[in-house]
Image (cartoon, grey):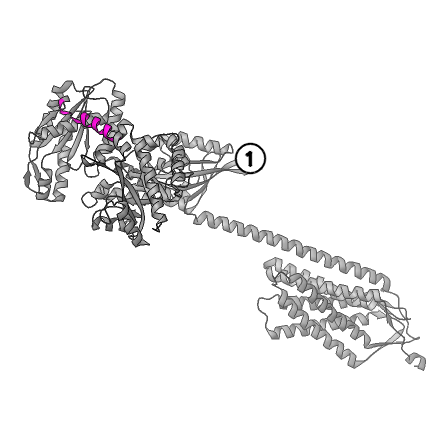
Amino acid sequence: MTNFMLQHVNESYQVSLVLLSYLISVFASFTSLDLVGRVTSASGKIRKLWLWGGSVAMGLGIWSMHFIAMLALRTPLHTHYHIGTVLISMIFAIAASFVAMYVVSRKKVLPRQLFAGALFMGSGIAGMHYAGIYAMEMSAVIVYNPAIVMLSLGIAYVSSFSALWLAFSFRRERSEKRLFRKICSGMAMGAGISGMHFTGMSAMKFVPDPDDIVYTADLISADLLAYSVGIATFAVLAFTMLGAFMDRQFAQHAAQLAASQQQYKSLFENNSDAVFQMDRNGRFVSVNPAIVQITGYSAECLIDKHVSELLHLKERNEVMARFGRTLSGEAQKFGVSLKHREGRTVELNVTSMPILSEDQVIGIYGIAHDVTEQIQAERKITYLAYHDEMTGLPNRRRFIDMLSTELGRSGETPLAVLIMDVDRFKVVNDSIGQKQGDILIRKLAERVLQALPKGAELARYGSDEFTVILRGVNGAEETERWAQKLLDAVRTPFMIDSREIYLTVTIGISLYPLNGGDYETLLSQADTALLHAKKYGTNQIQQYASEMDFRWEQRLELENGIRKALERDEFELCYQPQYDITGTLVGAEALVRWHHPEMGMISPALFIPAAEESGLIKPLGEWVLREACRQNKLWQMSGLASIRISVNLSIKQFEQPDLADKVAAILRETGLAPQYLELEITETMAMDVDRATRTLHDLKSLGLYVSMDDFGTGYSSLSVLKQFPIDKLKIDQSFVRDLHKDEGSASIVATIVAMAHHLNLKVIAEGVETKEQYDFLREHQCDQIQGFYFSPPLSPAEFARIGKAVV
């Protein structure tokens, strides 16, 4: 070979193609990092598809980088490439990429597996590179520098290991900086791959050989190859990235949908309320497990069952009408009684909503909350409030209600009211014991009921008092005959534990319309007759006569005395301390007393009814309210602990349309902040629900507190009570007094406390006098108490002393 032939040609690189090759290597590296994550997260056929597709895309990227970089080489020699060898070099790149992706996409990769994968991948890249060199057809001989060749192989292996390690590290990358990190890693990997190529290229020298003939068969031009490779590579990588992006979006959407479905399924299956779907025909399509417990029917039994089969006949039309309105697009809320499979009734609060599909209602989605226990408790407290638990008879409240109703509809039809008192019952009860005494009362009630005519009403008016309504009696003689039958029925001895117990009763009678036209008058006159009868001993009957009634004179004297007392400032207030259940002073109830200059202290039981009937209760009530507020402000100014003062409102005060304005004026006048005033109303004031609600809202808007006094002795129901903006219920002392003597009273107290707390109301019990009563109330979590057990009513000075002790 001549000296000329031994001289190698000068080489140079086209900068734009070098940069293009580097960009392709970075793009391919970034794509491979992203595809490894897709392969890792996929499974089954999708995993294999991404593995092969990713290997082809990654291999083409690496391969095209090498060849575009080779095409950037500029020599004076005319160069062509053998297409078969070029394809072989491409297979080397794809195979190396497949091994790389297979290794790093496995669940667990050991260090030796990374090294083995890097060795195979580096060998594949090196094989691709030198196979590509071998594909070059030119009039020259290629001379290699062995040291640089070995260096290029080392770079290939190090780059491959780095690429595998980065791909393994980023395959589950989820941080916010993952895109930035992948770009940086792709640039580093691209630099490594490019570095191997240009190091390998620097190991070659091209020595011209004029005797070497280049065959043009199966050859392609360098320019055509550059354009083809560049366009194809970018297209393949772009479509691969687009596919990966779309697959990721679909996967995220599928994951969100699956999570949403799982959340719905969890809410559906684990909801303690019954959840169901019905078609437009009212048949169940799906039900959750809770409905099985609520109805007693299995899910299989309910599916395709018509909802009407679970309804009581009397409610079907109303409920189906509700569902009909739901199908018209209007959500509904309603209560319904359902038939349990075992035959009992289940009370539900149902919310039904339309199911829409393409703006068409295709069914009903419903949620049903079981309120059976709540409604049963409400019914129980209502029953206990109006019935005597021991005998099952109507109690005092129910009897007054029945009598008022009867008088309202009877017109001039005569009736008689009887009050029957068991003679010396306390002596009998003490001798036989309370348990046997209760049995005796029940047997007495049964016997009296049997002796009464059809249509008569019997009630237990007190512990040893009964009242009777006799309808349509024909005058005083017929009434007395029936009263005598009652005396005769009771006179027969009762057998209690094999002992004969003899009882007698005394009866007082009043007649309608002869003796009066309202229940208060009739009861008062029957009671007057009873007192007169007792003057003559036991087992007596006495009918009311006008000469018995000496109360009117007393009433007139009382009314005149009240007017003068207001003018002369003879009224005074004492204060009943109120404590929380731990014994801490929290408030006081203002109680009015009348200190008459001649008659001394007059009981409120005498002058309050007289003031109410005469209308004097309004100025008296206003004086009490002003004085209580003034006194509480004085206590606060003297350094006493700030407490709430409680003042009773009369029904005539409550009916005043300007009540809220008057209360606000008194608060301004006395300077007492409204949060330290509590107004007490009674259940009878709330009978006109709409008016009472408006008045209570007006009072509450001032910022003061409202409580319901003597709860359980009037007419309110829980369904009405929850409409009122009140803060506290006060349990009547008649229930508290009989806690340990009457199971009914104990049940009423316990139920009132539980139901009040359910309505987020505080409860205070009045008339607490014994430790047993206090312990019972504390055990049942009553919030506050008042009564002689802690303190009697006190004068302002005495109350100030205990208030200072608290401070």
Question: Which is the main secondary structure of the residues drawn in magenta?
Answer: helix
Question: Residue flagged by tag 1: what amino acid is it?
Answer: Gln
Q: Is residue 332 above or below residue 123?
A: above
Residue 619 position in % (x across, y down)? 32, 31
Quarter of the view holding residue 142: bottom right
Quarter of the view holding residue 160: bottom right
What secondary structure is found at the residue carrying circle 1? strand
Q: Is residue 105 above or below residue 798?
A: below
| Res. 728 visible in picture | no
Residue 412 position in % (x across, y down)? 23, 17
User: Residue drawn 76% across and 76% down?
Assistant: 152
Quarter of the view holding residue 745: top left
Q: Few, some or many C-alpha atoms within 10 Å of disc 1 (few <14, some 14-19, many ≥20)? A: few
Task: Point out the stretch of residues depicted in magenta.
Answer: 547-562
Residue 555 painted magenta: yes
Q: Is residue 567 above or below residue 19?
A: above
Residue 692 position in % (x across, y down)? 37, 32
Quarter of the picture containing the C terminus is bottom left
Q: Which residue is mark 1?
A: 360
Quarter of the picture containing the N terminus is bottom right
Count of residue discs: 1
Q: Is residue 529 above or below residue 374?
A: above
User: Residue drawn 6% across and 29% down?
Assistant: 536
Q: Nearer the viewer, residue 356 or 182?
A: 182
Position of 85 with respect to 407 (left or right) is: right
Q: Nearer the viewer, residue 642 or 452?
A: 642
Q: Nearer the viewer, residue 646 or 518?
A: 646
| Res. 582 visible in picture | yes
Residue 382 painted magenta: no
User: Residue drawn 48% across and 49% down?
Assistant: 265
